[in-house]
Amino acid sequence: MSEEARVTFYPWKKTIDVEPDTTLLNAAEDAGVSIEGLCAGNGRCGTCKAIIGEGEAHLTPITTAEEQTLSSEQLGNGYRLTCRAKVSEPGEVSVTVPPDSQKTAGIVLTEGQELEYAIDPLVKKYHVDLPVPSLSDNVADFERIGEALEDTYEIDIEDVDYEVQRELPGQMRTEETEDRLEVTATVYDDQEIIDVEPGLSETAYGLAIDIGTTTVATYLVNLKNGETEAISSQLNPQTKQGGDIMTRMRYTRRNDDGRETLKEEIRAGINETIEEVIQEAGIDREDIYESVFVGNTAMHHLFLGIDPTYVAGSPYVAAREAPIAVKARELGIDINDAGYVYWLPVSGGWVGPDKVSVLLVSGHYKESPTTVCIDIGTNGEISVGNDEEMLVTSAPAGPALEGAELRYGVRAQSGAIETLRIDPETLDPEYETIDDEPPNGITGSGVIDALAQLFEVGLVDQRGKFRDEVLDHPRVRENDDGELEYVVAYEKEAALAEDIVLTQNDIRSIQMAKAAIQAGTRVLMDELDIENPDRVLMAGAFGNYIDKHSAMTIGMYPDIDPDDVVSLGNAAGVGAKLALLDKERRAEAERIVDEVEYFEIAGTDVFQENFMESMYLPHQDFDLYPHVKEKVMRRRELEAARLEAAETED
């Protein structure tokens, strides 16, 4: 009799035979089934939950982690965490993975501001016409091309790529005529020849690549006209080792091959996106000569294979801040082998090339209005100031704002609730889902709406606690674990076989995430003696999709006229394109790190104090948010008047 168990995953109906002691999450991966698992299989996030049908007896017993992460109702309905549940003996096991646990690519923001720029890349093609060597003119091939480039284009070539040098003689003579050699030399930074082609060639492409903690976006750009020819985006494949930066850092420390694994995963993912844009545009990879990368400091280090140990702990020292250019062949990136992979500089600590890219796009570091610029992700990056002084820092927002670690939080995907309003009279919700599909969870933007609405209509107080006055409402209830929750969508209207709720613990997770962003911003504002900024800039996917009023209501950014809040879209990706296409803008990006000051807040008393005050909605000092206070107080007065009228009638 076989010692293996047979596990079938639904709705895909994929079956795989596995050895005892194999987790269902690993079995799913081997079967080619994608299950979300943002905490790297540590049983904390709950995103890998699934329903066990037949064969529960062939699995290990429910663990403490599952009892703590799953609700009593979920456990009663047969849910298990696939990262904790293991096959214990041979037999048939059926596993149904609900929509909110299925890992999908989601919707990745690739758009951003359109800016004017010069098309002057570091990679250029030069056509030269050379005399055929002779006994009286026997200058070596490399020097012959170098002299022609200097005479014709006034550039001083210093080097040639080694592999290009090896094939140079044959390439030069492929289209030899009786007395002439006609070739096109591709030159990097007017110093190094990285390709030589027979005849005339004008085809040249580059890549702008934004590696986020959660998602990756790759842009194929025509270096001749600046047009974006194709875009590919996907989830960062490292998410299987953890949805946030610190989980991945722990993975590198706890596993001997952890750093190598994360490096190989992200490089393989990047190559997948490169293959997609190549296929879409119908070009040859040999015609891609450079890739400009941006990402936070952790993504920078993990992609390059740099030891991230010391940036992960106090005093948060990066291994390198200067920009770096490496041959594509050395990193295994699927462009022209002689081409370059270039990373913009690190500003300091966790403030990486992505923030430098945002500063390049926004330009607010060289403008007079006082500005708060926030790039919200699992690692929030914040800049505050103007052309006189600009400070930058990072704040550990965590993955809650992207839907992780919430009972029904999901990425932006079909069926996810993305906007939500609560009727102040009935306290019932109205929501919109992506693609108008039945709801299967709540996105980060939907969660921000939900918390803002719960506060505005009086369901929760400034502390984020459900108010006693609303505990008799049918949508506010105590679950089997004794935790209060608000029903966003009942089972009959949802795509799940259960109600979609926002729990008290969910609310606290959102408060903690927004408090990190708000506290980091407050520290910088206080340091620069700024009471309120002139404007707020929001960068990144999250900043693009959230409702400005909702974000201010919970205190995501300072109290300011919503008209003065501007979304930059995927500014990091746009900045990478600027650096790819315009060498002057690249030089500007390299200067930015000297013109803004990195300000470390992690672990400081002043950050902790601000964090505790920022846990309140929108802040412990309600007077810091006069617009929000006026709106909420007006609602409370109307509520009190209704209650008084009802009591009078009784």
Image: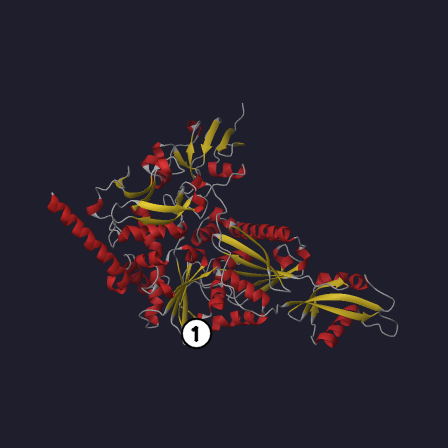
Q: Residues within 10 Å of mark 1 (few under 14, many from 20)?
A: few
For residue 285, which quarter of the picture? bottom right
Question: Which amino acid does the dot numbered 1 rest on?
Answer: Glu
Q: Residue at x 28, y 48 (%)?
A: 423
> Can you see residue 581?
yes
Q: Secondary structure at mark 1?
A: loop
Q: Residue at x 22, y 43 (%)?
A: 471
Q: Which residue is mark 1?
A: 367
> Which residue is at the far top?
1
Front-most of 166 and 556? 556
Q: Residue at x 29, y 56 (%)?
A: 615
Examine the rendered structure and indicate whether residue 108 appears above or below residue 489. below
Residue 99 percent across, percent down from the top left:
44, 39
User: At 27% across and 46% down in the image, what residue appears?
Assistant: 427
Outermost residue on the front side: it is 649
**Side (left or right) of 605 relative to 182:** left
User: Where, quadrant-wise, is the C terminus in this rendering?
Assistant: top left
Q: Where residue 18 sits: x, y (%)? A: 52, 32
- State the image quarter where residue 68 is shown: top left
In this rendering, would 330 be left or right of 89?
right
User: In which quadrant of the rendered image does the N terminus lie?
Assistant: top right
